[in-house]
Image (tube, rainbow, N blue to C red):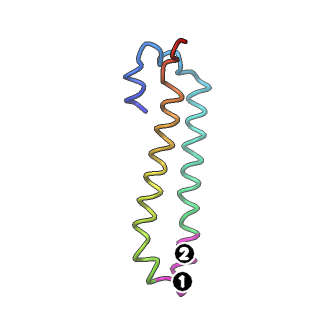
Amino acid sequence: MLVYFALNWPQSRAAVSVEGVLFVFVLAVLANICYCAAYLGDVFVQISGFRRAWQRWRFILFLVGMIFAAIITRWFAIAFFASPRPG
């Protein structure tokens, strides 16, 4: 987010407001809730018969989730700070 903020500096300064900061805070809280909810599923899979397969593929699922989070973060950063194009 900071890269898009810096690249669009004159226009992005107007995008920062109390409401915007609160919205980003709510998004961060929701992201943490989703991150913590993954542990519930992990516990149930660890005690099931799929434990061996889960341990093998767990890191791949983590990478897919991290890439997905990066894409969503980039999308919000562009929406918040990209300057509107005339025309």
Q: Which residue is located at x 53 percent, y 12 percent?
A: 86
Q: Residue at x 40, y 67 (%)?
A: 59
Identify which residue is drawn at 55% across, 49% down.
Answer: 31
Question: Residue 47 shows which numbered tag?
Answer: 1
Q: Residues within 10 Å of mark 2 (few under 14, many from 20)?
A: few
In this picture, is 80 found above or below 85? below
Q: Identify which residue is drawn at 43% across, 33% down.
A: 1
**Disc 1 to disc 2: CB gap under 8 Å:** yes
Q: Amino acid at mark 2?
A: Val
- Residue 77: image location, x then y, percent: 48, 32
Question: Is residue 45 covered in magenta?
Answer: yes
Is 27 left or right of 9, judged from the image as shown?
right
Residue 67 rendering spot, x and y as whole percentages: 43, 51
Magenta residues span 41-51
Q: Residue furthest bottom?
A: 49
Q: Secondary structure at mark 2?
A: helix
- Disc 1/disc 2 C-alpha distance (Å): 7 Å
- Residue in the foreground of this view, choosing between 72 and 34: 72
Residue pointed to by mark 2: 43
Q: Amino acid at mark 1?
A: Ile
Determine the image quadrant of residue 25. Answer: top right
Q: Name the mark on residue 19.
A: none
Q: Which quadrant of the figure has residue 53? A: bottom left
